[in-house]
Image: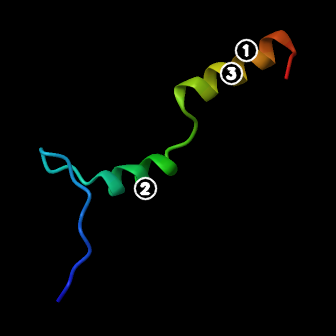
């Protein structure tokens, strides 16, 4: 059978799985900074 090629690092980390998990992890650091800045300055 022809299996799809896995996208992994040299250490064996599955890059596609990391991307899937990151997509469901919530806000990024920069998004939180922006949100807090907007709330405290009243700007959007």
Query: Decide: marks 1, 2 in contact (CB < 8 A)?
Result: no
Question: Is residue 36 positioned above or below 24 on the image?
Answer: above
The secondary structure type at the circle numbered 2 is: helix
From the viewer's perspective, is 16 left or right of 33? left
Question: Is residue 38 positioned above or below 18 on the image?
Answer: above
First in sequence: mark 2 vs mark 3: 2
The secondary structure type at the circle numbered 3 is: helix
First in sequence: mark 1 vs mark 2: 2
Give coordinates of residue 18: x percent, y percent: 35, 50
Q: Quadrant of residue 28?
A: top right
Query: Decide: marks 1, 3 in contact (CB < 8 A)?
Result: yes
Q: CA distance from mark 1 to mark 3?
A: 5 Å
Give coordinates of residue 2: x percent, y percent: 20, 84
Give coordinates of residue 3: x percent, y percent: 22, 79
Q: CA distance from mark 1 to mark 2?
A: 28 Å
From the viewer's perspective, is 1 left or right of 17? left
Mark 3: give few (<14), some (14-19) or many (20+) Cα within 10 Å: few
Question: Is residue 8 positioned above or below 39 on the image?
Answer: below
Q: What residue did someone put label 1 on?
A: 37
The secondary structure type at the circle numbered 1 is: helix
Q: Residue at x 58, y 36 (%)?
A: 27
- Closer to the camera in the image, 22 or 2: 2
Q: What residue did someone put label 3 on?
A: 34
Q: What residue did someone put label 2 on?
A: 20
- Closer to the camera in the image, 28 or 11: 11
Q: Residue at x 73, y 15 (%)?
A: 37
């Amino acid at each position: 059978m022809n299996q799809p090629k896995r996208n992994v690092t040299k250490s064996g980390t599955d890059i596609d799985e990391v991307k899937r998990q990151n997509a469901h992890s919530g806000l990024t650091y920069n998004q939180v900074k922006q949100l807090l800045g907007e709330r405290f300055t009243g700007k959007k």
